Image (tube, grey):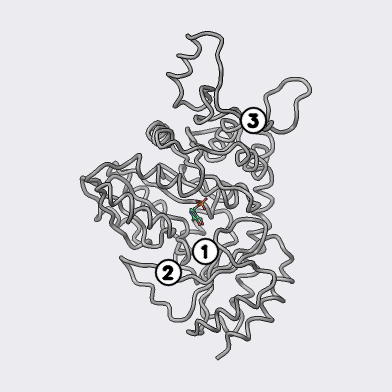
Amino acid sequence: MHDSSFNLSDCLVQDGRPDRVEGRHVNMPVELGSTMVFDTLAEFEAARNARYRTGTMYYGRYGNAAAYKLEQILARLEGAEAVTLTSSGVASISTTLMALTRPGSHVLVADNIYGNTRTFCDGLLSQQGVEIEYFDPMIGADISKLLHDATAAIMFESPGSGTFEMPDIVAIATAARAAGVPTILDNTWGTPVFIRPLALGVDIVVYSASKYISGHSDCMLGVTVSNAAYAERIRKTVMQIGDKTGGQEILLALRGLRTLKLRLEHIDRAGREMANWIDGQPQVKTVLHPALPSCPGHENWKRDFTGAGGLFGVVFHTSSDSAVRAFVDALHHFGIGVSWGGYESLVLPVAPVRTATEWNEAGRLVRFNIGLEDTDSLKADLAAALPLLDP
Ligand SMILES: Cc1ncc(COP(=O)(O)O)c(C=O)c1O
């Protein structure tokens, strides 16, 4: 969708705000509510008929004014025709896969996919009679060899969770589109600040907005972005399941968007600085950061992205679990916990799960999320703990 007046910084600040009336607040108000009432039965019936359409005020579960504002700003950021909000990133992923499949469908899933996407595919989706086939994330145009009549979707991630291979998004999207198979890309790491996947031929983009979009580790939210062809199916599935986005989360995501570019510019710089610094430490075997040449798919990142998220992996030489545990426990500036994309730095050991390809890096893999702290403090913290990984 071409939008000649689009300017990223202006959009992040100006869009998704209250409509122009005198004396309005800067931000959307808190809106609580289930029932919406109408003056006439005809107005009520018109709203009911349009309830799956964004912007329709019908009943709280379908959306409210702030939800529609958030959908509008996200659609503009992505250059998309439609956005559907859900209660979490996992809800966006599962409802999108449900919307596109039925018993007998075949779905191709990248082997480095986020763990809970794999859990959903191997669990509920398989139980519904959908065949799941995992593929090498670096497959590129050869994905076409795996497509057949029953293939209903390709699900992949930029970059892969834990192991950070950056796929050739363009090659996969082009091959899929030639065969009429929709692609779903989890672009939580890249965000619309660094890449707009629909412009590269991807059909549907999903986000955990619990990460960078809200940005403060205080919000659970999912976003599904698509062109018009898939919008209604996705929205109806979300509504039929009864998934509902909380009013407070919508306001937190709108607030997060105001600083998204600023935060990510810092995180991009700080993340690369930290990745390069860690790369120089004797305990480190390899750094898996898409902006570093050592990361598989680095060339794809260079071609398609304008910046990098601050989440990356480090493979340490040690094969000792107890040494890794001691190292992680010794860090003071890095919290130990799942999720990422808030303002705070995090650390977590990762054990990649593979079923179609091998993960055969010797050593131990640890994931770092770089936040907004002073990078000198982060380096000093790591420097003090790294000797615990020495043989
Ligand atoms: C790449 C990726 N996608 C999706 C999710 C799931 O998002 P949520 O936690 O909002 O359900 C996560 C969460 O860690 C993630 O890392």
Picture coordinates of residue 161 (x, y %)?
A: 47, 61
Q: Amino acid under label 2?
A: Pro
Q: Quadrant of residue 18?
A: top right
Q: Are marks 1 and 2 in contact (CB under 8 Å)?
A: no
In the rendering, which numbered label is found on residue 31?
A: 3
Q: Amino acid under label 1?
A: Pro
The answer for how far apart the CA atoms under marks 3 and 2 are is 42 Å
Picture coordinates of residue 237 (x, y %)?
A: 39, 36
In primary-sequence order, the first of circles 3 and 2 is: 3
In the rendering, which numbered label is found on residue 352?
A: 2
Residue sitting nearer the eye, 274 or 67: 67
Q: Is residue 56 left or right of residue 111?
A: right
Instruction: For marks 1 and 3, give the one nearer the viewer.
Output: 3
Q: Is residue 30 above or below residue 260?
A: above
Q: Is mark 3 within 8 Å of ligand 1?
A: no
Q: Residues within 10 Å of mark 2 (few under 14, many from 20)?
A: some
